[in-house]
Structure formats: C-alpha cells, structure tokens
Amino acid sequence: MCKLLLLAILWVVPSTQAEIALGTDDSEAQVRVGCLFPLSGRGGLYGLDSVVGIQVALDWIQQQPIDYPRLQVLIADSRSKASRATRLAREFVQERRARFICGVVNSAVALEVARVVASEQAFFIGTDHASPRLTDADVSPYYFRVNNNSRQSMYAAAHYIKDSFKSSREAPLRISYLGPDYDYGYQIWQDLQQALRQAGVRFDIVTALWPSLYEPDYTPYIEALKQQPTDLIINSLWGGDLVAFIEQANQASLFQHADFANFDTGGNYEVLAALANDMPAGLILSARHHNNWPPTDYNRWFVERFHALSGRYPSYAAEGAYAGILAIAETMRTVGVHASDAEISTALKGLRLRLPEDPPGFVSYMDPVTHQLQQVIAIGRSQPDDRLPPATKLLGDWKVYPPLP
C-alpha cells in the first residue's frame, strides 16, 4: 500500500468511523483477523499507529522467501468502550469469519473482550494492554499477549532501582508513587512493591497519590510530592496524562526535588514528541518499544518503514500491532490454515518471534503457562537527541534487563 493511500485512510477513519481492510481481498483470504483499536478520541494515536504497524507487518511478510497464509486484517474503532468492543468482536467472529481478534489498548476493555472471544472459541492476540490479570495462572486458552505486561516492566524497574540507588536497613530508599485511579495504576504499584522486595531493595513509602484518569490539573498532587523528602518519584501515568503532568511539573520545579521515573510507558515516542523541548533531561523512562534501541538493522528498518508510510515516527503501539500480525502469520504458517483450535494453541504456546525490539542474540518467546510473550526491557534516561523530530530528546544511558527467570 502506498504512503498516500495509507495516509488517506488514516485521515478519513476518525471522522467516518469506517472499517479499514488491509491485506488480501475477502475472496482470497485464508486467515481473517479482526482488530480493535481506538481510532478517535484521546487514545486515537495508539490505534492509528497500530494500523500503520499492521501494514508494516504485511510488508515484511511479503518480503520473506517463505510462503505465509494470505491474511485479511479488518480494523474497527473500539472508541475505548467495552460494550462497543465486545459487540465488534462478536461481529468479526460470527459475521466476518475471523478466527483471530487482535489489539485493544485499554486493559479494562481487553478483559471484557477476552471473555467474549473465548466464548466464541476464537483467539485473542493482545497487542497493547498491560494488565497482568489477563496472563495469570488461570489464563484463557484462547488469549495470548505479544507486548510485555506491567508486571514484567516492574520486575525490570526493581532491578534498575537496585542497580542505580543505594538502600540499606538503616537508610531505606524513600519512594513516592503517583498512578491513575483505576486497575492499571493499582496493579503497577502492587507489582512494583513485590518486585522491590524480591530484589532485596530496602524502601519506605513516603506517599501514594491517585489522580483520576484524564485529570486536567495535577497541581495539588505535585505540591504534595514536593512537601515530602523523597529520593525517587515513580509515576505510572501514560499518554496525554503523562504529558500534562510533566508540563505542569516543569512549572513547579518538581524534577529538582527528586529523581523521577516512569518505567512502563514514559519513554514512549508519543510522549517524547508531544513534549519536545519541554521534556526534561535526566528522567528515568522506558516503554514497550524504542525507536533508537536496539540499534539493529531490523529495528531501523521497522522505524524507517513506518515513517515512509505515515510521515511520523512510531509509538510503541505500532510495534505491538506489528508483533500481533507476525504472531498470527507465523502460527498459521506452522500449523496450516485448516488447523484445529488445539493445534493453533499448541503452536502459540511454543511461539518464538524475532521482533524489532529484540537485541542481538535474543528472540522473543511465549511463556506456555501464562501465554505472555517474554521480552527484554531497556530502561534509560532522557537526553538531548534530535535525530527523530519533533522529539528533541530520546533515551540513552541504557540498562537492559532480560525476562523473568
């Protein structure tokens, strides 16, 4: 698909809510995939980036010397609403004969979609939500996730803190936390504390604050953080909320008060680009994919191909969607397009998938118990770097952590 055509599709979708169809024609499709992303509203960028990421995946498949099944990918606007997303999922399976559902940005929506898709006996490939509740011990046999979850991020965060900050029984690390007042924020805080204890980090909790999702004014929370002596402020806001928080924290000189970290989404290119010169140097950040790490030919190709199609650089949502399509294509290539559910499940449990985010010598692999893809997590600090405008800072000074043992 040419750049102008893809840009035209992305321009039309937010106003018309039209369905997007990528890949092969309906008459030639061997595998149908129904994807659910917000294509409008505050989460719209994640959906639009995911659409481009899917096209990049289809481009990659076409370049390979081996034959993959012919995929048709249908994409609809979930509007980040559970009722709409579950209805669309049923329609994809029942009316469009989709054997796979992919996507979903919001974890609360994903939980509802997972129940519906399992009841329809189709497979749900999660690409951009992070709640570990979906990959606990009683994981659905029809659910598999290809982006790292927040528990994996907090495991890496705990080891980064252990490597970067001193703590002892006599002088525990003083931590303040601020997270959104819903399941994602609570789960990160719970997982982080558990991971810190497992890593042997001595810490005291100074305060934990819970602004609402889409909070317009963080001033009271910022002032509360400044009033307490703290060694490390850990923040789990994401997207526009994190951008707004950092802009307001700049004005209040919060970053001169203590070190600041956001270990799950803070290093997303969306945030770096939105803040541009307002992104402070020295913040500790990570994300589920980085445009400048690892510095491999594969990652550079992914970023450059995305930019060629869209005219912008990708947020991590794009690589999640890319991974989802490759996971489906590789699974169906392995088992054949007429495989049973049991054969597909077995193949997904044993999936190994080389992705742009994989450093040399590592290949992402599926945990057969939790159905969670295992990936390396890189954490860095923001520093001046204008190679990927409009961002004027990227991450560097990396520390890299392999998956949970």
Image (cartoon, grey):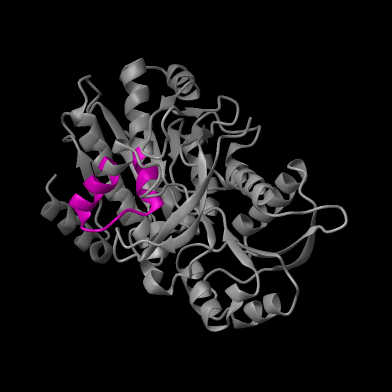
Q: Does the magenta stretch include residue 270?
A: no
Q: Is residue 338 visible?
A: no
Residue 399: x and y in percent read 54, 46
Task: Name the residue at 60% across, 65% down.
Answer: 260
Q: Does the magenta stretch include residue 308?
A: yes
Q: In which quarter of the image is the C terminus?
A: top right
- In the image, taking residue 196 as reference, residue 64 lies left or right, namely left
Task: Name the residue at 51% across, 73% down.
Answer: 246
Q: In which quarter of the image is the N terminus?
A: top left
- Which one is nearer the viewer's eye here, 336 or 400? 400
Task: Name the residue at 75% across, 75% down.
Answer: 228
From the viewer's perspective, is residue 5 above or below residue 241? Answer: above
- In the image, taking residue 334 as reference, residue 250 lies left or right, namely right
Q: Can residue 100 be seen in this view?
A: yes
Residue 362: x and y in percent read 45, 29
Residue 2: x and y in percent read 11, 48
Magenta stretch, residue numbers: 301-322
Task: Name the residue at 21% across, 42% down.
Answer: 22
Q: How would you classify the magenta stretch by its main secondary structure?
A: helix
Residue 364: x and y in percent read 46, 30
Count of residue discs: 0
Residue 386, image quadrant: bottom left
Residue 96, image quadrant: top left
From the viewer's perspective, is residue 387 above or below residue 336? Answer: below
From the viewer's perspective, is residue 176 above or below residue 365? Answer: below
- In the image, taking residue 87 as reference, residue 138 lies left or right, namely right
Residue at the far right in the pictured view: 170
- In the image, taking residue 73 as reference, residue 178 lies left or right, namely right
